[in-house]
Image: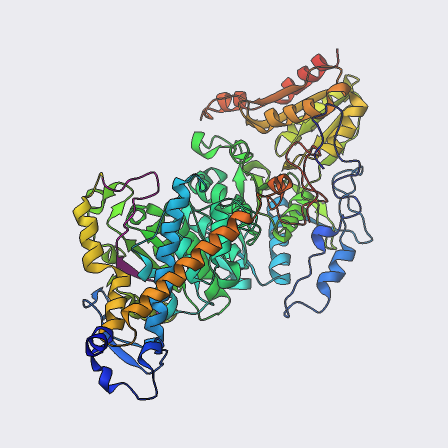
Amino acid sequence: MTTAFSLRAAAPATAPCAGVRSTSAARVVPVSAAPAGRGRMVARAAVAAKADAPSSAVAGKSDGHEVLLFEALREALIEEMKLDPTVCVFGEDVGHYGGSYKVTKGLADMFGDLRVLDTPIAENSFTGMGVGAGMKGLRPVVEGMNMGFLLLAYNQISNNCGMLHYTSGGQFKIPVVIRGPGGVGRQLGAEHSQRLESYFQSIPGLQMVACSTPYNAKGLMKAAIRSENPVVLFEHVLLYNLKEKIPDEEYVLCLEEAEMVRPGVHVTILTYSRMRYHVMQAAKTLVNKGYDPEVIDIRSLKPFDLHTIGNSIKKTHRVLIVEECMRTGGIGASLRSAIIDNFWDYLDAPIMCLSSQDVPTPYAATLEDATVVQPAQIVAAVEQICQ
Amino acid sequence: MAAAALLRRIPAARAPPTVFVAARSISDSTAALTIETSVPFTSHLVDPPSRDVTTTPAELVTFFRDMSLMRRMEIAADSLYKAKLIRGFCHLYDGQEAVAVGMEAAITRSDSIITAYRDHCIYLARGGDLVSAFSELMGREAGCSRGKGGSMHFYKKDANFYGGHGIVGAQVPLGCGLAFAQKYKKEDTATFALYGDGAANQGQLFEALNISALWKLPAILVCENNHYGMGTAEWRAAKSPAYYKRGDYVPGLKVDGMDVLAVKQACKFAKDHAVANGPIVLEMDTYRYHGHSMSDPGSTYRTRDEISGVRQERDPIERVRKLLLTRDLATAAELKDMEKEIRKQVDDAIAKAKESSMPDTSELFTNVYKKGFGVESFGPDRKELRASLP
């Protein structure tokens, strides 16, 4: 099945989860405690986001309910923990304290101390323990209070979490979810404003997703928990209080799929996490200026959804990547490279990539704002590309 | 005739008349035997188990056989490495066999074992076979990890053997995670997390021990103290080389790791303790004849006299041989025959392993992710280089 290197789009002809949209939800829960057959019923009833609909699709007969993003994450956790008794949560202050961002609030009362575990401040070991528990059949959700702290667990995430399935010749699976807030916040200082996507992206065997709305947060969290692969779910410190109406009925999203935020024709803007909002803000200005940008929230940082991205590039022929990662070795750098490899012939202009500056995030508010990409820069970039 | 009888065993005249002296088979009796360990156990925060170990002649013979097999396998691996059939890193366990064999005798396959990179013999102890071991060492597809792991990544899931890890100390938190899962699932089993005297100085060990003690996990941390962490002697690396005490608030036991019966006793004791009370630390005082790995001659940081001294005084296989001979459970000739047979077994396994082919190129991309990853497995650039997942 190996093909020679080809600059023509070698992206798959079908969308990543087309036809198998419910696959991620179709895992049969082999637990007697689960309501009989509910696992299978859920799979058929699962509603995945349609690629072309607006992101906050509240499809379905019921009205939906409004939640904040952290509540959406919590709903997902509760639903999955109810469905599958092997799901457990490890983290600092997740239990009795309720989680430093309230994602696990109330879970310890609902599920007990053996399933919602307050760990000491020992990321290296409790991440390792999560991996070990995963090897033995549990499905831990490991929370880093801030993504940056997981650097202490890098060895466990890279060597054990990512590689054990391969080095054991397929014997062990590590269905852990590693999640936590990262990104530049409000003057949190350099060590608490890190973006680890770039550090983890080369680890083979890991999947990475970034949520950005309550709707996709819940869907991605559920998909991540159900996935047999280790998934790193990147949340953002500033997005926890976003409010949105999400469906009442259960839904699971596809981990490898990107989200069409705003269809357009002039330029493809690829973004994820918090920068999606800066892009949408810039989009308002751009629309007033007569541009019609297509905005895609890539969501899946590893692997990239080159199908959705490719289709967009074939339409617009111009690409702007807007990310919060550092310029050097960031997600944008890899994405740019992937686009060049696959869609070179469709490009009418060089790919532009707006990233954060290669500096430790300063404390001063003005400097911090200058570190990340602002809407004005996005507008200017689009104008430049579309000349 | 009398001389011959003397050579074979002393009470030749008292042998049962139905047994022909020349064809007497090795004892397979399961009558209980009590043997004293070489030295008493030293303990920390707990009452040590008794020095008297119950065993049977059959078990002792099994110990001899298993340890000899392991010894032969490691020596064969040495030759294969020098013949460049095994590449990369190869860490040999010869000298330490008693730990693997004694531990296995004390526990069941439902208990879990996890260790670092000196894992070939533990793989065998857990039921792994020679052919898949040698195949894996030579990177063939018949290997236990399909040729993709190598010497440091032997695993056997159905026997609850969790590997096989290259990074020093990282397996200990994994082991505590296994113990957590055992407690979560209410299994009444324990996890033995093995590490070396070098790894004993890793912070993550203490982190994991703290959590295990807090949550009362059935975790047994076993320090295989062969007195050298790679090329550095223990007294130069650890301020306190009393590894069994370094659990601080966690009880510990120091064991003569060259005495398979002591190991068996200690592991049994530890398992009972861990399942009831939470973590315990075992320090196995053992020794490796080879260097840290095949790239280390093993003689720059210790003297040849020391190595041969240990071999003469404390070799685990010789100890069991002496037990068998002095208690009349086997003759020297029988044991020699057994060793010959083992040698042949190992040679046959190597020959068989050599016949196995290298993994197919498509295997490069299998098992990166578990099935269920979209439709096909693609790298981050989604190019169609990958094979479809099975």
Left/right placement of residue A387 relative to residue B204 reads right
- Whether residue A199 is visible, yes or no, is yes
Q: Residue at x 50, y 58 (%)?
A: B156
For residue B146: magenta? Answer: no
Q: Quadrant of residue B210?
A: bottom left
Q: Is the magenta stretch mostly helix, strand or loop?
A: loop
Q: Can residue B215 be seen in this view?
A: no
- Residue at (28% x, 72% y) in the render: B331
Of B52 and B290, the residue lying toward us: B290
Residue B265 pos. (x, y %): 29, 70
The number of discs equals: 0
Q: Give the range drawn in magenta.
A: B277-299
Image colouring: rainbow
Q: Which residue lies furthest to the top in this view?
A: A387
x, y percent for residue B229: 28, 45
* Residue farthest bottom in this picture: B17
Q: Quadrant of residue A337?
A: top right
Q: Which residue lies furthest to the right in this view?
A: A61
Instruction: Tell me if residue A354 comes above or below residue B146 in the rendering.
Output: above
Please name the residue shown 76% across and 35% down the image. A12
Which quadrant of the view contains residue B123?
Answer: bottom left
Q: Does the magenta stretch include residue B294?
A: yes
Of residue B282 and residue A231, the one placed in the foreground of this image is B282
Residue A319 on image: x %, y % = 71, 21
Quarter of the figure with the N terminus of chain B: bottom left
Q: Which residue is outermost to the front?
A: B1
Q: Nearer the viewer, residue B370 or A215?
A: B370
Q: Is residue A172 left or right of residue A67?
A: left
Residue B135 in the image: x percent, y percent?
51, 49
